[in-house]
Image (cartoon, rainbow, N blue to C red):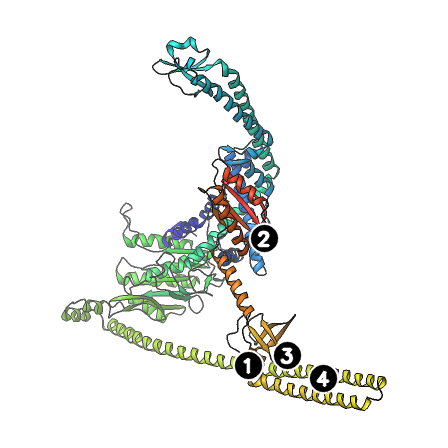
């Protein structure tokens, strides 16, 4: 592969589209370095990666890849014992979060079905989810410049002392500036800060009236900023506390950095895997955007692109093409008018081959075949160079010479307007010689041309085939369809005539060209006309054939289905008959046993009771026989109920019991029904609808209420701006609704403010019957302004 080929086929634009799909800079760097491979097994592996990524995106949506950072610098720093800044630690935490989120993403996918994504699942399995480090960093750091009070008890205690000390200093200073004795000496009754210490502005002439340390003066010199002696010691203590705070923060950052250093190898491995996963999912996203498919690869030089589309053209406007070669023929000569799509066809074949060999899905129909080539060369476009004093022909020929000097077996070569730019006779002869040379080397070649000599060459040379881009003379516009096996007409005379050129000029032009050329063009026109008729007839025949096949399949299916249903109904009837007879036998045995008991207990009533029980036995047998007949007749005569719904009341004829439908009929017509405490599986033909009851209405109503709540209820409630009483009333109703809807976690937004609303809400939910647990929101969830509640 060479850069000229990449440029001619616009491969770099595909790489740019792939780079855009990557989430992280690591993934973008990996995407920029993508290159076509020549080993079929390696390419198959890359294609499988893309296929798995596409499948996961379609099944689960885009993976949680946001937050992957290049933390190489941070890892090197902790490796030599350095301490990381809060921002650097948050980048490490983000990377760990992505690793953990990907594990959950794959875990949810595997619950759906047995593993279909072994490559990606293995990569995710190798990720380490170091949640203890992630939680420690998130608990200690709020943002790039702020450490949380929760980072350590010592830090929390120091900050409380700082707040207290600040309050003491302010109280003293406020007393000074409010004092009538000192007010007259002050420039303004305010407290400000200079060099990190609290000061008051004093008039220059009153310098000695307020004892203290001068820290600054105004630009005019009229005002001195003095730290009164009354607060000097307090300011000193405040400064000491600030130093302790800084030292504690440095200790916390060092401790967190040491935790990262302990898992350095795992985090470095995570980075490599995350980069690879970002790259793989970028290929999947690109395939989804282009509606790409995984091609079938081969090493036999066989290309069969079905409904291929150029990936850089508008998908709604581009006309798909079918291209095949490399089996019966190795060289394809494409002819036809300008702007008909010849060059686009060349670029489509070349670019799709490069994409396939790079592991990227191609925008074509399923089961398209792409050959793996060692080299791909392209001479496309007008590369005329004024600076190098090269004509169009010279420029093309220079490129062709380089190609012929570099070509080897198992190559694909694409020529646009081969032999153009010079005398047509010489150019055509040169083009045929080049094609013959490549044919002897068994190289796959596609060339476009306007020369009639090359059309004849393709017709008369083995392993060479004509193709043309279709052109509609009536509309003077190309259809962009590629027709393999049919040489194309230039249509110059027809187009000129349609555009209004006088007939005598066109007739004279016909006289100027040879009789053979005219006849050849007429033959091409006849072939094209016959081809269109044959194609139309073929389309109708295929359409009728498909309809016949569908009817045949439908009839066969219905026949098999009817046979299966008949056998199942008879089998079910036999089983029910056996059960009824068995019950009758058991009942008869019971009656006979009772007769014997009567005989032994009461001799004098023996004959009478025997008579009665014999009557009972006869009646019971008649009932059994009648029931058996009725059940069998009902199974056959009654039509099964239509449009059964889950929960609907039905009567099971074979059991003479009412029940409730648990599941819809399966493909064999079997329905799961709840009868009393039993769940039975019966055929739909043995069921009839029962009258609805009031309890069903109540159940349905309750289900509808729960369903409505589930659809409308949100997982957060905003109580900001309300009084505590109003908020508690709204919260009580909201908790009931969330409990009914089945939500497990909700967010109560109360804001920070004075803390009255937050404290009141927490006190209320502490003993609420629906609340299992609650906590303050984390960084990213709203912090102290949000309370997260877990519902029972």
Which tag is nearer the camera, tag 4 or tag 2?
4
Q: Which percent across, then down, holds residue 188?
A: 38, 18
How far separated are the C-alphas under marks 4 and 1?
36 Å
In this figure, which residue is indicated by the disc labeled 2? Answer: 122
Mark 3, secondary structure of its residue:
loop
The reply to whether residue 70 is visible in this rendering is no
In this figure, which residue is indicated by the disc labeled 1? Answer: 560
How far separated are the C-alphas under marks 1 and 3?
29 Å
- Sequence-wise first label, 4 or 2: 2
Vertical position of residue 517 compared to residue 445: above or below? below
Which tag is nearer the camera, tag 2 or tag 3?
3
Q: Which percent across, then down, holds residue 588?
A: 75, 85
Q: Which percent across, then down, holds residue 128?
A: 59, 45
Asked where in the image residue 476 lies, by quadrant, the reply is bottom left
How far separated are the C-alphas under marks 3 and 4?
14 Å
Frontmost residue, 165 versus 649: 649
In this figure, which residue is indicated by the disc labeled 4? Answer: 584
Q: Mark number for residue 655?
A: 3
């Amino acid at each position: 592969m060479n850069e000229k080929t990449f440029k001619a086929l616009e491969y770099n634009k595909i790489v740019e589209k792939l780079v855009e799909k990557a989430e992280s800079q690591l993934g973008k760097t990996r995407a920029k370095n993508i290159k076509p491979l020549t080993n079929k097994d390696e390419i198959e592996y890359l294609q499988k990666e893309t296929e798995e990524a596409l499948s996961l995106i379609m099944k689960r949506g885009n993976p949680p890849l946001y937050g992957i950072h290049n933390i190489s610098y941070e890892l090197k720093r902790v490796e030599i014992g350095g301490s990381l800044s809060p921002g650097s630690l948050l980048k490490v935490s983000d990377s760990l979060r992505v690793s953990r989120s990907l594990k959950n993403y794959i875990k949810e996918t595997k619950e759906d079905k047995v593993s279909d994504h072994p490559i990606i699942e293995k990569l995710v399995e190798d990720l380490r989810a170091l949640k203890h480090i992630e939680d420690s960093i998130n608990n200690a750091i709020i943002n790039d410049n702020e450490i949380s009070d929760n980072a350590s008890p010592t830090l929390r205690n120091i900050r409380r002392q700082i707040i207290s000390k600040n309050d003491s200093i302010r109280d003293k200073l406020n007393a000074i500036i409010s004092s009538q004795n000192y007010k007259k000496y002050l420039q303004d009754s305010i407290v400000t800060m200079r060099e990190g210490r609290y000061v008051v502005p004093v008039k220059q002439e009153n310098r000695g009236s307020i004892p203290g340390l001068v820290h600054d003066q105004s630009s005019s010199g009229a005002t001195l900023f003095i730290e009164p002696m009354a607060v000097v010691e307090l300011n000193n203590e405040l400064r000491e506390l600030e130093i302790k705070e800084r030292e504690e923060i440095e200790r916390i950052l060092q401790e967190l950095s040491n935790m990262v250093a302990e898992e350095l190898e795992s985090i470095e491995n995570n980075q490599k895997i995350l980069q690879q996963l970002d790259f793989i999912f970028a290929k999947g996203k690109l395939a989804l955007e282009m509606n790409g498919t995984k091609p079938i690869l081969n090493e036999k030089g066989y290309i069969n692109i079905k409904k291929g589309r150029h990936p850089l053209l508008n998908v709604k406007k581009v006309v798909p093409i079918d291209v095949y070669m490399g089996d019966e023929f190795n060289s394809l000569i494409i002819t036809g008018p300008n702007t008909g799509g010849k060059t686009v066809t060349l670029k489509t074949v070349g670019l799709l081959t490069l994409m396939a060999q790079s592991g990227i899905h191609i925008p074509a129909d399923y089961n398209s075949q792409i050959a793996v080539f060692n080299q791909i060369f392209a001479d496309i476009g007008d590369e005329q160079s004024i600076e190098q004093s090269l004509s169009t022909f010279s420029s093309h020929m220079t490129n062709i010479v380089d190609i012929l000097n570099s070509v080897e077996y198992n190559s694909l070569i694409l020529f646009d307007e081969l032999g153009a730019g010079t005398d047509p006779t010489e150019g055509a002869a040169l083009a045929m010689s080049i094609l013959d040379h490549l044919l002897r080397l068994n190289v796959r070649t596609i060339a476009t041309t306007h020369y009639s000599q090359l059309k004849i060459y393709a017709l008369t040379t083995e392993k060479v085939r004509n193709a043309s881009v279709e052109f509609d003379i009536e509309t003077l516009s190309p259809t962009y369809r590629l027709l393999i096996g049919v040489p194309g007409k230039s249509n110059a005379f027809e187009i000129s005539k349609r555009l209004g050129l006088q007939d005598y000029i066109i007739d004279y032009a016909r006289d100027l060209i040879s009789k053979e050329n005219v006849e050849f063009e007429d033959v091409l026109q006849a072939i094209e006309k016959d081809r269109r008729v044959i194609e139309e007839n073929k389309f109708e025949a295929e359409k009728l054939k498909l309809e016949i096949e569908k009817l045949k399949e439908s009839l066969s299916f219905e026949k098999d289905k009817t046979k299966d249903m008949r056998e199942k109904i008879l089998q079910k009837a036999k089983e029910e008959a056996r059960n009824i007879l068995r019950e009758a036998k058991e009942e008869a045995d019971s009656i006979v046993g009772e007769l014997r008991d009567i005989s032994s207990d009461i001799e004098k009533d023996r004959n009478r009771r025997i008579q009665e029980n014999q009557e009972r036995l006869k009646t019971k047998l008649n009932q059994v026989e009648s029931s058996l007949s009725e059940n069998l007749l009902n199974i056959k005569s009654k039509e099964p109920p239509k449009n059964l719904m889950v929960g609907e009341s039905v009567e099971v004829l074979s059991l003479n019991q009412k029940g409730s439908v648990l599941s819809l009929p399966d493909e064999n017509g079997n329905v799961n029904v709840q009868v009393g405490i039993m769940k039975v599986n019966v055929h739909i033909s043995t069921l009839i609808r029962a009258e609805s009851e009031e309890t069903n209405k109540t159940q349905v109503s309750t289900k509808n209420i729960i369903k409505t709540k589930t659809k409308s209820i949100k997982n957060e409630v905003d109580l900001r701006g309300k009084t505590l009483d109003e908020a508690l009333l709204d919260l009580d109703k909201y908790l009931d609704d969330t409990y009914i809807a089945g939500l497990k976690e909700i967010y109560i937004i109360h804001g920070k403010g004075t803390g009255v609303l937050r404290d009141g809400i927490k006190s209320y939910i502490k003993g609420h019957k629906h609340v299992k647990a609650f906590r303050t929101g984390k960084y990213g969830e709203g912090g102290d302004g949000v309370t997260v509640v877990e519902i029972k």
